[in-house]
Image: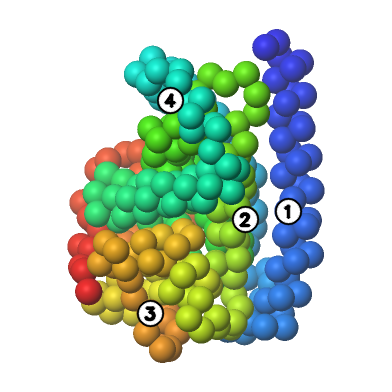
Amino acid sequence: MDLYQRLLSFASDLVRLSGWLVLLLIVFVPLERIFHHRSQKVLRRSFGADVFYYFLNGILPKLLMIIPLSLLSAGMHHLYPLGFYSSVAALPLWLRLAAALVVNEVGGYWGHRWSHEIPLLWRFHVVHHSAEEMDWLVTTRSHPIDMFFTHFCALIPLYVTGLAQPLANKVDFAPMAVTAVTMYWAYFIHANVSWRFGFLEWLISTPYFHHWHHTNDTPEVLNKNFAATFPWMDKCFGTLYLPKEWPAKYGSDTPVAPDLTGQLLDPLTFSDPVFDPPAVKQI
């Protein structure tokens, strides 16, 4: 691909991301103004930085994914017979999508949990947990390496189970659909809305469920609710936490640089022992 094509692709990505950002603003700003859980400004502290992360993470993790995902696809293609993929592709679409959502959640759960348990990964993931005010745009506040890692972990089971078709000659619908659903649902579960959903909160993730993942209340309630879509995944692995009240505060005790340059470069220095994450405790 020559320079002109690369610039054209980059410009296309910027236009696409800008369009989606406008739509997200139109949807979530009124919702959070009317149904807010906490009263806070739309242009809150770090809003501009999170917009920067929105564009950065809309482009860079996708580029980081190209080589490892290509290697994974090629490996699965050579490991499994073609008949295996044909039999999976012959399943009803609803069944493939349902299975893809579940196995994607398994990979995403463990990728997310490892990002809390392993100090090397926590260095990058803590950028996301540095937010002390929660709203829909906090979704994008992530170090690109952290976002790449968790998304790659979520995709691995799709390829291992054949629900993603490596080296197929047509658009691979299942991983695209699952990625789109989980990506845009993430904006909702970070949103500053006070809605509660009764028993459904045990079945599908909600703002209330995920806000407890971002709490900085007491050590006993840290590192819960890792699932992106299905809370019962946390129930299966012993990390579900659904009390009656909302968290009192958000953020992390791990120091994070106040400026964008520091947030992006500090995790790469590997020199500061305070990056050790708090241990995950099972309930």
Q: Which comes before the other along the chain, label 4 or label 1? A: 1
Under mark 4, the amino acid is: Phe
Secondary structure at numbered mark 1: helix
Estimate the x, y position of residue 126 in percent, counting from the top left: 38, 56
Query: How far apart are the two marked residues, 3 and 2, measured between alpha carbons?
Result: 23 Å
Estimate the x, y position of residue 83 in percent, counting from the top left: 45, 21
Under mark 1, the amino acid is: Leu
Secondary structure at numbered mark 4: helix
Query: In the image as oriented, which residue stretches furthest toward the top?
Result: 2
**Disc marking residue 122:** none
**Disc marking residue 242:** 3
Q: Residues within 10 Å of mark 2 (few under 14, many from 20)?
A: few
Residue 121 falls left or right of residue 25 = left
Task: Please give the residue where the numbered disc 2 appears in the rendered image.
Answer: 184
Task: Please give the residue where the numbered disc 4 appears in the rendered image.
Answer: 84
Q: Nearer the viewer, mark 3 or mark 1?
A: 3
Query: How far apart are the two marked residues, 4 and 3, measured between alpha carbons?
Result: 40 Å
In the image, residue 189 sits, relative to residue 272, either above or below, namely below
Task: Please give the residue where the numbered disc 1 appears in the rendered image.
Answer: 21
Q: Residue at x 27, y 62 (%)?
A: 237
Estimate the x, y position of residue 213 in percent, counting from the top left: 40, 68
